[in-house]
Image: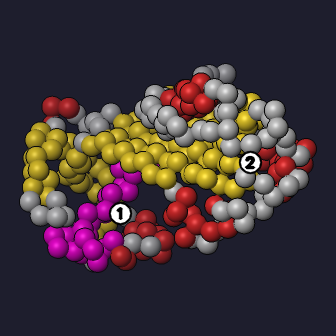
Amino acid sequence: MDLALRRPGQEPDQRLLLNELNAIWTGKGWTFLEPFLDTLSVNYDTGMRELDFAGDPEGCRKAINQWVRKATEGRIDELVAKGDFTDLTALVLTNAVYFRAHWAEEFEKRETRKQPFHRLSGGDVRCEMMHQSTHLASFRGEAFDAVRLPYFGRRQSMVAVLPDEGAFAAVEAALDAEALSDILEGLQEGSVEVGVPKFRFERGADLAGTLAALGAPDAFTDAADFSGMTGKPELFISHVRHKAFISVNEKWTEAGAVTAAQMDGAAAPSR
């Protein structure tokens, strides 16, 4: 899925872009049932891409990482590393989401200046802080302030919540769906002076253990039953590699995430 603002007869406006992509990579020698392949086509708009995980694991790694780079506009360079694939690798499901949106009112670079940023762990660091005096929707809650920063087109926005000093833990614990709904309903337009730090944050993790702990432990062991895919209970999920990033500057917000769920077999297929 690729979404962007578009007027009839015009190219999509790149000031607001959302890409969501899926790809399935299968190893040579593995066969999958037609109903499973039909499900991929109908529900995920993708088919199988055959790779030789056993004979050319490095080439497979490069191919998937190239897909990752393209799907995230080059912002995430590598998801799978050397040694991740073996002759037991049967399938890799990749998913990517990329978002880029210009601010409705961009921050003036001349207003960006170094200022202290207060760490939760104590102490300050100096960071580039963007400033803007404008008309925005804001809300004063119990021990926090919130402001809505609209993106181009004003249909999407970033809602920033700033806890009072010493109240971060309490505000974070109370910030559920109902609390967020109350904030959105309580936003009121007015003159606002806002300061937003420029930042980029990236994190990667293998989520297999986390997902197993959430209630699907068998899927990650030889007790798994994915026979609906191959006709036999021979596959299990070995890794769920994930990377995500967000970047905020005077011009726009960029954010993206990629996931690669790898399935291995109990034994290599006959070749």
Task: Please tell me whether residue 22 is drawn above or below residue 209 in the rendered image.
Answer: above
Quick check: marks 2 and 1 in contact, CB under 8 Å?
no
Give the residue displayed 79% in from the left and 41% down from the top: 269
Is 256 on the left or on the right of 166, as rendered? right
- Residue 32: x, y in percent? 85, 44
- Which one is in front, 98 or 23? 23
155 falls in the magenta region = yes
Q: Give the range drawn in magenta.
A: 143-172
- Crowding near pointer 1: few (<14 within 10 Å), some, many (20+)? some
- Which one is in front, 124 or 219? 219
Q: Which mark is residue 188?
A: 1
Sequence order check, earlier mark of 2 and 1: 1
Amino acid at circle 2: Ala
- Which one is in front, 190 or 102? 102
- Which one is in front, 121 or 262? 262
- Residue 82: x, y in percent? 49, 34
**Total count of labels:** 2
Which residue bears the numbered disc 2? 267
Is 91 on the left or on the right of 168, as rendered? right
- Mark 1 falls on what kind of element? strand
Task: Please tell me whether residue 118 is drawn above or below residue 94 in the rendered image.
Answer: below
- Crowding near pointer 2: few (<14 within 10 Å), some, many (20+)? few
Residue 60 in sight: yes
151 falls in the magenta region = yes
